[in-house]
Amino acid sequence: MFFAAVLRIIRPRSTPSIGCADSTGQKPLRRSYVAYFLRDFSPALPYGLTVLRRERASELASRQKTHGEGIHCWSPRVPTPPQQRSTTMNENQPFKVTTTADILAYVPRTLGFQPRESLAVITMRGKQLSLSLRVDLPAETATPADYAQGIMDYILADTAADGALIFVYTDEVADAAKTGTNHYAKPYMAHVQALETEMERAGWQVRGGWLITNLGWMPFFCEEEGCCILQQHEEIRDSALNAHMVVTGHTVDEDPARSLIDPAFIGSDTAHTTIENAAYWLNRLDPQDFTHPAMSEARAAWSSALGTTPTEAEACELVAYLKNPAIRDRILVDILSTTDDHGAFLQIIAGRYESTPDWSRVEAMQTLLAHLLPYTPTEDRAPLFTLLGWITWHQGSSSIATAYMEKALDISSQYRLARLMKELIRRGGVPLTAMNERTSYGAYWRNKH
């Protein structure tokens, strides 16, 4: 077991493998190496990293720092389970953006939720939109330099970027504005200026910045009365780009948790007992390596279920397999790759896998999990929510991944895999697949469509 045994035996730090080989040469999964991975992220970042996503190619450019006219874009998308996607329009159809309101409509639509007390950055390659990042606004202990450098550590993964757009979402008021010393002062100006400085050092140009509050929005860098005019949110809601993205299926929730897959239970009263009984015998068998008959049977059952709509009996069987931590961890890795290489297994489960995942299989697994939930009683859903969160994390949305982990913990507060994953995300862990344009889910989706 990789994650689930973290509170049991931790092998000496000098041991590099997942476990010791037995007489057959197979390495059991009993030992946990979470401690080794989490120590790489031991100092929690001075802010909460919640979303990192490489977007689809989007033509977006502004003529000057505080205005957004003359912009052209290809509508982006938010990764969602395949069965939830709208196919009523061709999303690759180019769309001309002519106002700042269009730009501001883009951000929550591409994140899938409305940012609150957040800073968002969208990197640009000339006129092409590339990578988006949303982080919590800095804590009081975060210096502007540390905050800016922490953000740059992530967005510099976009090695072809030459500019960026900055968005500050907050209802806070700058001290100078409160006292009347400077009516045009903006909150977190020192942190944004530090970020601008770091971008300039990287050879980037900040091509736009905006402050968005509950009352309206305005250019962030404005310093004159004619420029610092609070605009109404109706302009964003009525913008052409917002209308276009609504039609193409880009939804926005006020809270990331509202976008989670969590259907009502439609199974029988005996479903929980069926799952528990099957899980009991699986745990008695205690499958600890890839060649154990129960492990092989579980992997075959899950693989065979891909692309199908399971019955209640089939759903209970598949969920029961996830009650065994060793099998669950193996099924978790199988989502990205069915490799039996133990080194790759370790990399995948910890988000350190650098090869391109089988994204078509990932989508099929995501759909299968959505089909299993209606037949799974609430008390048995923690493994399913955790797997969905792990998938979403690899697809590039840490906000929604965290919401899934929290939902799993609401069911079982001591569910270790969800606890560890939530902590990993809190510390700023991002899968290498999401950081690399070639291996990202967005690249797969673009090529597919």
Image: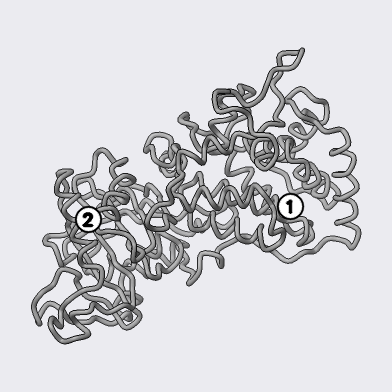
The image shows residue 240 at horizontal and vertical percentages of 31, 70
Which residue is rendered at x = 55% and y = 64% of the image? 259
Could you say which is closer to the camera, residue 103 or residue 351?
Answer: 351
Mark-to-mark CA distance, 1 and 2:
44 Å
Q: Quadrant of the N terminus?
A: top right
Could you say which is closer to the camera, residue 22 or residue 229?
Answer: 22
Residue ID for mark 1: 372
Secondary structure category for the residue under label 1? helix
In this view, 176 is above or below 331: below
Which residue is rendered at x = 71% and y = 14% of the image? 25
Could you say which is closer to the camera, residue 330 or residue 303?
Answer: 330
Choose the circle earlier in sequence order: 1 or 2. 2
Residue type, numbered disc 2: Leu
Secondary structure category for the residue under label 2? helix
Which residue is rendered at x = 71% and y = 61% of the image? 411
Label 2: few (<14), some (14–19) or many (≥20) C-alpha neighbours in 10 Å: many
In this view, 383 is above or below 242: above
The image shows residue 203 at horizontal and vertical percentages of 14, 44
In this view, 10 is above or below 257: above
Residue type, numbered disc 1: Leu
Which residue is rendered at x = 80% and y = 31% of the image? 287
Q: Is residue 59 left or right of residue 400?
A: left
Q: Quadrant of residue 70?
A: bottom left
Q: Is residue 214 left or right of residue 331?
A: left
Q: Is residue 140 left or right of residue 258?
A: left
Q: Is residue 106 visible?
A: no
Residue ID for mark 2: 195
